[in-house]
Each structure stands twice: as C-alpha cells, then as structure tokens.
Amino acid sequence: MRCVHMTEARTLGPVERFQNFLGSFQSEDGDYKYRQRISQMAVRGFRHLMVDFDDLVIIDSSFAEDLVDQPDVYVGRAEEAALAQLRIEDPEYAGEIDRVRLRFRGLPETTLLRLMGADHINRLIMVEGILVRASSVQPFLTKAVFRCRRCGTTVPVEQTTPNVQFPSTCLDPSCRRTGPFDIVEGESEFINFQKVRVQERPEDLPPGQLPRWIDARLVEDLVDVARPGDRVTLIGVVRTVRGYSQGRSLSRAFDIFLETNYIDILGKELEIVQISLDEEEWIKEFSLDPRVHEKIVRSIAPSIYGYVDIKEAIMYLLFAGVPKLLADNISIRGDSNILIVGDPGTAKSQLLQYVSKIAPRGLYTSGRGSTAAGLTAAVIREREGGMTLEAGALVLADRGICSIDEMDKMRTEDRVAIHEAMEQQTVSVAKGGIVATLNARTSILAAANPALGRYDPYRTMIENINLPTTILSRFDLIFLIKDLPDKEVDKRMAEHILQLHKTGSSPVEAPVPPQMLKKYISYAKTIRPILTDEAMERFEDFYVQMRTTESRDSPIAITARQLESLIRIAEARARAALRKEVLVEDAQASILLMRKSLEQVGVDISGSGEIDIDIIMTGKPKSLRDKLQVVLSTIIDAEKETGMVREEELYERLQREYDIRREEAYRLIGQLTREGTIYSPRQGFFKKT
C-alpha cells in the first residue's frame, strides 16, 4: 500500500488530505480501491461512498483521529473532497448531484451502550446492539421553500434544527414583512427518515441490570436496512436534544440520540462467535474423537446430576438441524422445540438458565411474567403520535434459543401467541395500522410443572399438564422428570449436592469448558449435513413400522410431524461431530431418543397401554375416543325410540351391551356434557346436542 508522508500530509488542508487518500489508496492487489468505487457511483446511481476506516488510519491516522473527535468539521470537509474526486473520475455525474455522502465502516473501537455519556457528545462512535423498535419511513424536510402570503415572493431556507425554521423576513424589498409564510411542498426538498431504537444485546447484559438503549435517526439509503430483532452495528455522531420537565419548562437534563452515518447488520446469517486459528484447530481435532457426543453431553450443566437423555436432547437443540426453503417458497424449520415437565425441585429452571447462557444467542424468560406482546411483538404509540413496532423475546432470540420457564403458568391468550413462532418461525402483527411479519427462527426450550403439583402416573399426559394440545403437538421431544424415591439414586444425588456445596465447584469436570462449547456450537452451525441413503432407509423403516397397525382399530403411534423431528435431531447429531453427512448411527440415535420421549408421554394408560400419538396431538387417546363414541351412539339409538334417554336406562345399557361400568360411564357422560356434545333437557335425561 502506498502511504503519504505524515509531515507532508499535515501541511495540506483537510479537503486536500482526504482527496489525496481517495486518489492514492491501493489495495493489496494494487487496485485503486476508492477511485474504482467513485467511478462506479454513476453506474449504480449511488449518492454515497463507503469508506473503510481502517484504510484511513493506515494512510492518515491524524485525519482519522480528527474525524472521530470533530465530525461536524471533518465529515463535511471529507465530503467536499469526495465530490472533488468525483469531478475528476466522472464530471458528468458530479454535475447531476451536489453532494456525496460518506459512509464510514468499522471504527477501531466499539463503545458500550452502558458507558455512553457526556464525553461522547458530538463525537463519532460505534455501538453494537439489537434493534428493538423501528418507526415507519417518513419524508424529512431538508430545504424548505416558503411563500409570503402578502406578496407571493418565495424564500428558500436550509433546515438544520429538529423543528421547521421559518424565514425572519420576506426577501422582497417592497414587502419586508415578518410573515405569515406558507411552505411550498412541491419546491421544497425532502429525504427519507426513520427512527429506530437499539438496545444492549441480552448476552451482554450484566446480571440484575436493566438493558440500556439509545434512539438513532436514519436517513436516505440507511432507512429500512434493518428490522426489529436484527443485531446491528451503528456508527454515528452523538447528539443532544433538550428535555422538558413538568410545566414545559426546559430541564437541565438532556436526552441523547445517534445521528447515524452507517448501519451494518451483524449475523444476518448464522451467528459467528470470534474463533482464533488455534481454537479452530482444537475444534476440528475434538470433532474426530469417537466419543464426541458423550463428551458434549457431559459438558452440558455438569453441576446438575443425571438427566442424560434430557441433556442429549439439549445438545441436539443447541446444534439444531438444517432449515430448508423449498422451490415453492415453503420453509421447513431446522430448530427443535423441547418441553420438560417435572415435579417441583428437579432443577428444570437451572437447566433452562444454563442453556440460555451457553447458546451463542440465548434468552431466558418466565411464563408468569410474560405477555403475548412481550414474547412476540408490540405496537407502541410514539410521543409524536405515530405507531412503532417493538420486538419481543422470540424475535430478539432470532437464530438462537429462547428458554421459557413456567410455561403452564402463562395466561391462555398469551400462550396462543407463540403457536406461529413454534412452527412457522415468524411473528405476524396486525395492530394500529401496522401489518408486519418478523423473523423468529428460534428453538424453544420450555419447562412446566404438573397440574396437580406432582405427576400422577394413573392419568394421561394431557390430564397431568395444564397445556393445550395445540402447543404440545409442536414440541419435537417431551420429557418427564418424576421425583421417585430410589435408595441408590438418592444416595448418589445427595453426595453430588453435598460435594457441590463443600467445594463450590462441580464434582464432575466438564470435558469441554463452557466458553469453548459456545464456540464449538457456533462453528458447527456453519455445516449443512445431508441425509445419506442408508439413513433415509432407516427412517423410512421406522416410520412405516410405527404406522403399521395390526388392525384398523389400533392407535396411530407417530405422524409425519415426528418424522421431521427425527430428521432435525439426526442432522444436529451429525453437526455435533462436524460431519457433512447424516449417517445410520445418527438416524439410530435420534430414533432411540424419540422412542424414549414417546414411551414417557405418548402411552395410553387408561386403555391399550400402547404408544398413541393422539394423546399429544388431540388430547384424547384412541381408546377414550372409542368409548365416547360408544356412549354417543347409544344415546342416538335410544333417541330414535323415545326422543330422549333416561340416565338410569343409559347406565344399564352401557353395562349390559359394552361392559362399561357405572363409574366410567358417569365420567364419559360428564366429559361429553362439558364438551357440549350432549345436554340434559331435564333432570335425569340426556339428549344429543
């Protein structure tokens, strides 16, 4: 790279120094980088020029420092230089546009939102955060043309303040009035303008602290670049705006905002954590270990004793499957959703907290304190009167994991909001004139307590959990944690907990440290494993075998939804070993885990004792549906003879013809009445609705 001598550079004025940089900077392959960019401006119709700040530091570090300390002076001078250089490269296009806007990318230092204050006012800074709010794009007045109402003379005024600046007097010497003036909109100049709010990223937040945020103003080519939920880097000048105290008197406390110069979206694709070459070497070496999966499972929450199956499922959740976008624009999610249902005091919340910290992007929330708007997106009315969209937890956790604790404690209307996010992986909002769809490509790890305090083994899964089937059917895997007394297990658990309290560290050492595991997951997510023919064959055999029933009356064991879950789990297992192919062993491991989950939650306890997926899908096992159908058909048959059926007669008939005992018949009739299928026209009689 060619460099201007520093003493020579300092003798020139700021415009000449910056023009010298634009004209002389050469990239490593010898190309004149900025001369090429300037000459392409006319071809692309651009009015802005991208400048990499690192290049400016190499050529003229003192100008770079001045630009950061005094952007009001030096950005203007640099834009003059860019226009002068454009006149050399393309005089015709330079005549069409009167200004070249400069966009500076990549300042050497990032300022934390938490540390922003008085020292940064009127300085150029770079901040990183998550976009949580974005207004609609509005026209913003830059140059107003006013017409005097008395004489009709037009007066142009450049607009530099937040409020409209009117002319002091009419320019016509014979008029010289101080008003009134009307804005001539057709002759005035406008640019696109948008207000956004950037908040600290959840993973950067110190424990127990509220997230800090800053409002930013975007203009021209920067508007609508990012949406709520995107992780962004903003470069801009910190400005102040006067705050008002009560009674509309001026307050001594000022608000700050960012006059944005450049916005860059981080992690538009997969979130990549910074990984050094040595770490990459270690990651590749570790992935070749034949016991790689076992070691990762042992590294997940080592201070929590046991739960090997659940930790294995969490491993697949962290690595995730491969999302697919089909030719007809139908997308298939790659993220898995897992539900843990367990008795109180079984470390469910600790597992969820751990996962939200270890995931490259993780967010933890509790169902008790979450609303539908807080989980998805809220429409907020601004002080100016407009409506703004604000991202919720599932949108903020885009391309990450959202841990939702106490899911059963959520209000029904709030819980319904996450249906779409779990399957379609989007959040749709239609409120206050705003109709928008935001990305929520999130894996959900949820925990719930049994409805009666402890899990009742004599009741079905649905009867035990206070969750609707619409949500349960969207979970790939559901696990039960039962707190059953077992002398050997209890002894080992007690030893583990006591050792934990004595030493202050886990008795079991994690093969992979948490920070390294985070980097390993991030690295693995760049791999897109493909199913091999052998793995496909194994899945097909399992699916057909589970669906094949001995008779038409047998329950259905799994549906296509579970087959897709199996594929996701197998892809995640291949990713965990950094493999580009899904092997038979991955298929076998995913089938084994799915069987364990189904055996825990999908078994028809009250009837056949077989796996029946309808327990999760519809809330009723086939055996119960059959009995309800028997009761209903008996009532219909009796109605044909007598118009309605007497209660005692119904009990006798069910006992005689179908061997359904009185207690069970009473329960079945009660359920049909609650569902509104039958009703009692008068005491002691039933009739179909």
Image: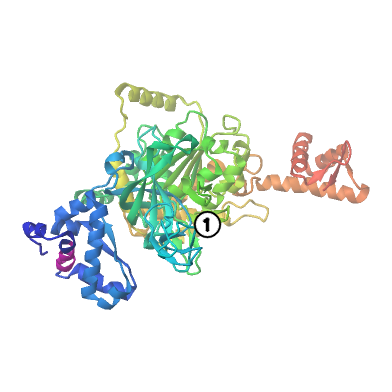
**Amino acid type, callout 1:** Ala
**Towards the viewer: 687 or 651:** 687
Relative to 86, say whether 246 is above or below: above
Q: Is residue 468 left or right of residue 404?
A: right
Residue at 26% over, 59% down: 76
Q: Is residue 42 left or right of residue 489?
A: left
Q: Quadrant of residue 78?
A: bottom left
Q: Is residue 344 left or right of residue 463?
A: left
* Classed neighbour count for the residue bearing mark 1: other residues with Cα under 10 Å, few (<14), some (14–19), many (≥20): few
Q: Position of residue 481 (x, y in %)?
A: 50, 35
**Highlighted range, magenta:** 18-28
Q: How many callouts does the rendering have?
A: 1
**Towards the viewer: 516 or 629:** 516
Does the segment drawn in magenta span residue 24? Answer: yes
Residue at 76% over, 38% down: 670
Does the segment drawn in magenta span residue 283? Answer: no
Disc 1: which residue: 436
